[in-house]
Amino acid sequence: MAEILDRSQRREILESRRPQRPIRYEPELGGVYTEDEIEAAVKAMRDSMDWREGGFGFIGAEEIQSFERAFADYVGTEFAVSINGAGSGLDMAMMCLDLEPGDEVICPAVNFIASAYSIVSQGGKLVACDIDPKTLNLDPEDVERLITPRTRAIFPVHFVGLSAPMDDLQDIAERYPHPKHGPLKVIGDAARACGATYRGTAVGKKGWMTVFSLHTRKHMSTLGEGGMITTDDPELNARLCDIRQFGSTTDSWGTNYKMTKVQAAVGNVQLRRLDETNAMRVQRARERTALLQGVDELTLPYEPPDCGHVFYVYPMLVPRHWAGEKRNRLMELLQQEYLVESWMASAELYKTRGFYRRLVGGQALPNSDEISERIVCTLIHALLPAEENEYIAAAIADAVERVAAEA
Ligand SMILES: Cc1ncc(COP(=O)(O)O)c(C=O)c1O
């Protein structure tokens, strides 16, 4: 197990292990594939060569059916619907709400932009919610404060691999039913949390539905793009299946959000390996935490005892008085002097992207405002070597010491 680095060890690591090229915060082509995925993909292609039987895209394909069954079993839900990406899945989730003009959806401000787009594209009103500064997930107390008779749904993101507080949100959803539609719907965005757990259940089990991304940067991938939606609700499942396939079974609207069978064949193998690859991520995250123990300026990632964090990235906070300028200086130093790229995990988007800023403007978000200026995330990957992880930790510790020494 990694141990806290003293100054001379740090120097030695920084000098001897300097990388040849920058260490990305999020690898562009991060799929962890083995010969098994390659064989599965080739087999699915070969099976498609019989022109009377073949075809890559049909949802009746055995590979797609078995991937959906396996994913539902993994999460513990009745249904799983494969799709072509989480962005589509979030849009589908909002379509299934049948929003009327002025209907409100509560969503954390500290989030990727896709949720905001999905709400607005269906004519809903985004009500931005504050976050808990410890978990960086949406804060149930603020959710409760924001509920009005127009609220239709609570739309948490499971922030960089840590589950949102689903029981608290479900409780609120039931205590404040919508006058016409009944209990509010809780819809999870688990794009960055595939394989995470919450109180003994897999993320994706709780809530009305949960959307996963299987994009190349995520915990498991279906050849670059892909997604999955889980639910226990049979009517919702039927509607989702319709939306992804031109409204094929009922009279409802639909288009093409399908995954291919080659992707599903690969997804089946990736899913079998998910716990193993996530365990590799968690190991590196915990080693980094051990290595950074002595760096008092940093608040290291919080792992609640009832949640299994799957570390999409490694999130840290700088001290309050470093918010903004000194945090930015730390990120700049890491990149320029140590070739370690870092990232705010989209926490700043609601302030920097004009479209998002206009939707959120004027709402009181004190914790989000602070955290978006204090957060720094660095790479975690299942294949990150221990030596490179030590280099990243040494670089962080060294850069923090330099920033602290600057006037
Ligand atoms: C939190 C979150 N939601 C949704 C998405 C969209 O996922 P996809 O790329 O599968 O469409 C992403 C992608 O990075 C994400 O991080």
Image (tube, rainbow, N blue to C red):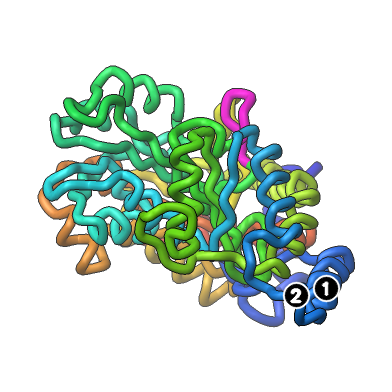
Residue at image mark 2? 54
Q: Which residues are magenta?
A: 196-202
Q: Are marks 2 and 1 in contact (CB under 8 Å)?
A: yes
Few, some or many C-alpha atoms within 10 Å of disc 2 (few <14, some 14-19, many ≥20)? some
Kind of residue at badge 1:
Asp
Q: Residue at x 87, y 70 (%)?
A: 39
Q: Tell me the SS state at disc 2.
A: loop
Dividing the picture into quarters, in which one does residue 405 lie? bottom left
Circle 1 sits in a helix, a strand or a loop, which is it? helix
Q: Going from the N terminus, do you reach mark 2 or mark 1 first?
A: 1
Residue at coordinates 31% horizontally, 44% vertically from top-left? Answer: 97
Q: As displayed, is residue 258 above or below residue 347?
A: below
| Depicted 218 relative to depicted 197: above or below | below
Q: Is mark 2 within 8 Å of ligand 1?
A: no
Residue 123 image-quadrant placement: bottom left
Asked whether residue 183 is drawn in magenta, I would say no
Q: Can you identify the residue that label 1 sits on?
A: 47
